[in-house]
Image (spheres, rainbow, N blue to C red):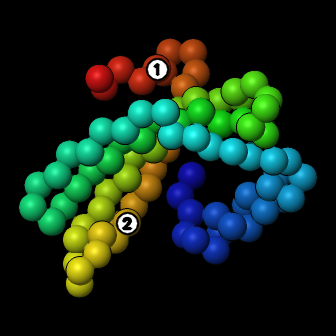
Amino acid sequence: MVFDVDSYIADVTPYFAATGFFEVEIEQRVERFGQVAHVWSRYEARESLETPVIKRGANSIQLCFEHGRWWVFSTVWDNEREGVAFDLW
């Protein structure tokens, strides 16, 4: 699915209103060329900090350095599941 900011907020609001969600980065890899960077960020998600992990996955984040700061241009993610495991490093 592809969302703009407002449609993403509308999509997740009912879930987050009813359920806790804590995403914790467990590993990160940054690749940078000049003013462009790509970040792989592996995560674990839980409904609270004390509950078991409900999912793991990876965020792919593209950034550009402009006007004295890094800007996020896109974020894409996927969850680990049968047949899809994180094997980049």
- The residue at the point 26 percent across, 45 percent down is 30
User: Residue 83: horizontal and vertical position, in percent?
Assistant: 50, 15
Work out which residue is located at the far top of the displayed protein and give it.
Answer: 83
Of the residues under marks 1 and 2, which one precedes in the sequence?
2
The C terminus, quarter of image: top left
Does residue 39 appear left or right of residue 8 in this picture?
Answer: left
Work out which residue is located at the far right of the displayed protein and give it.
Answer: 18
Q: Is residue 14 above or below residue 52?
A: below
Q: Is residue 36 above or below residue 26?
A: below
Q: Is residue 29 above or below residue 20?
A: above
User: Label 2: few (<14), some or many (≥20) within 10 Å?
Assistant: few
Mark 1 vs mark 2, CA separation in Å: 25 Å
- Local secondary structure at mark 1: loop
Q: Which mark is residue 85?
A: 1
Does residue 48 appear left or right of residue 85 in this picture?
Answer: right
Q: Amino acid at mark 2?
A: Val
- Badge 1 vs badge 2, beta-carbon distance below 8 Å: no
- Residue bearing the label numbered 2: 72
- The residue at the point 54 percent across, 26 percent down is 80
